[in-house]
Image: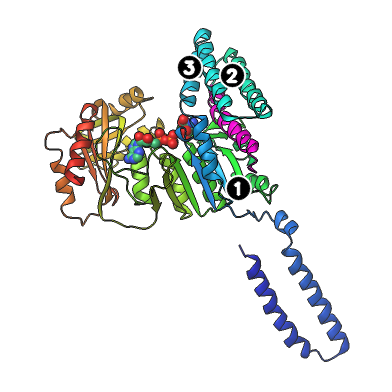
Amino acid sequence: MLSKSQLLSFGIFFRKFWVINKNSCTTRRERIRFTIFWICLDFIFFVSLHPIFIHFCKIIHFMKISKIQKFGGTSVGSATRMKNVAELINDGDTKIVVLSAMSGTTNSLVEFAKYAAKQNFSKVDEILNNLNQKYSQVISELHKTPEFIEKSTLFINSVFEFLKKTAQKPYSITIEKEILAQGELLSTHLFTYYLQEKNIDCQLIPALDFMHINIHGEPVFGRIETDLANILNQFPNQKLFITQGFICINHNSEIDNLQRGGSDYTASIIGAIVNADEIQIWTDIDGMHNNDPRLVENTKPIRNLQFEEAAELAYFGAKILHPTCILPAKEKNIKVRLLNTMEPTAEGTTISNEVSHSGVAAIAAKDGITSIKIKSGRMLLAYGFLRKVFQIFEDFQTPIDLITTSEVGVSVTIDNNKHLNEIKQKLEELGTVFVEENMAIICVVGQIPSDTIGIQTKVLQAFQDIPIRMVSYGGSNYNISFIVRAEDKVKALQTLHNTLFV
Ligand code: ADP
Ligand code: ASP
Ligand code: MG
């Protein structure tokens, strides 16, 4: 696509032709014709730069948004935290702020939906009362003026009324998703009312008006871009926009979501679409640590990570980031910064294309893994066996995480057991099948290309007292993965940490 300045340079260039060619016209008639031709050309040229033309050509034009700032559940988990966030974002930059639900709310809504499905109304009422109490308390601490106390109270009452009515309806997945969406709607409305009360100029833009997903649950970038541009362009002088993370509209125009933890994804989708300078993920810790801080002692923040490393860590269990959120940022080469709301001056982690270290950067673990081993004499010297195995997983829409093979067997891991029995039955047509549930993936991530010497030995040494079910190395330059029993996970993480980082 050509920018306006490029078009202008073309215009000036053509003008030069005009001067040269005009001099070569000999008769008066020729000159008149020539001048009319150029007037028409000029007219087309200038009209093409007009915003209306740009609009009709569907050339999408965004105002410059410098930052996307996403605040997670704990960052907006109380009235005090919301007030801190309001101070943090109020720096005059043009930005879109993405908020999660207040911490605990989505979990409560999941419970609520579960009991509503079972028509267990005493539990439904209990959850609703707890939520009501919590949010009434937040409102009383958040606002000073009766006007805004009333506005916020009216809003939460409408949400609780909606939840109450919805719980009476027969269960469906759509209803469950409508229930889950209320958390982000609550946090963003209360926060916006707080900003308005403080006279901080802001605009709430509903995610349900632009965040579309397709039948596979993936963002529809083209549609999001058009709809978001239309919304933003209605407020050309606005600097601060607020929107909901996590929630979206699906191919059936129903309320849906980007999976648990998906507000990070919302932030990176928006960041990529508006071509922001950076995407900031604000949370309750000072960046990506070199091991899981919930399970291992003495973990440290990592200052810089490459997109690929961050994606591997997020996918293999580093809860600080939603796994899908790296890709949109990587594709547009927009740096992602992980920052701490409780300690805003801490450096955090910057994720970009730059490689600033060598060797192992971090370790992560993913639970809920099932390992499946298929042993078959038919695999020996045969071709096509793996295709048949993969086809079965594809038929049951079950992604495979890791894979290792030998001449007589193949082992894979999955993290979704929904169709385990059917998959097992089908695989038994190919050979003897062994299934082990309750396993964990331990993932060592960093710059570990195949010509690395020493790291692999060191990593394996850490497992000298821990049985390893599977090893996967060489699939990328960024990870070595091990399958261990779930009960050995913490020991494996701690031992690896002591071996590699202490
Ligand atoms: P938010 O609610 O802000 O989205 P999350 O709970 O999703 O926050 O993610 C932050 C949490 O991720 C931290 O409190 C931390 O306990 C956990 N976590 C797990 N692994 C890591 C890691 N490697 N580095 C940093 N935090 C991690
Ligand atoms: N509120 C949603 C959840 O708890 C999304 C998010 O926080 O990112 O999963
Ligand atoms: Mg999160």
Question: In this view of the protein, can residue 448 be seen by the observer?
Answer: no
Q: Which residue is mark 2?
A: 163
Give the labeled residue for mark 1: 225
Q: Are marks 3 and 1 in contact (CB under 8 Å)?
A: no
- How many angstroms separate mark 3 from mark 1 (CA)? 35 Å
In which quarter of the view is residue 7 placed? bottom right
Name the magenta segment's main secondary structure.
helix
Q: Is residue 151 above or below residue 119?
A: below
Where is residue 425? Give x, y as percent.
Answer: 31, 24
Local secondary structure at mark 1: helix
Where is residue 449? Give x, y as percent. 25, 54
How far apart are labels 3 and 2 at the CA level?
Answer: 13 Å
The residue nearer to you, when weighing 47 against 375, is: 47
Query: Nearest the camera: 392 or 247?
Result: 247
Sort mark 1 into few (<14), some (14-19) or many (20+) by Cα contacts within 10 Å. many
Q: Are marks 2 and 1 in contact (CB under 8 Å)?
A: no
Image quarter hosting the C terminus: top left
Cα–Cα gap, marks 2 and 1: 31 Å
The amino acid pointed to by label 1 is Glu
Describe residue 337's horizontal placement relative to residue 191 as left or right.
Answer: left
Amino acid at circle 2 = Leu
Residue 314 in which image quadrant = top left
495, above or below 36, in the image: above
The mark that comes first in sequence, 3 or 2, is 3
- Residue drawn at the location 41% of the way across and 45% of the way down: 338
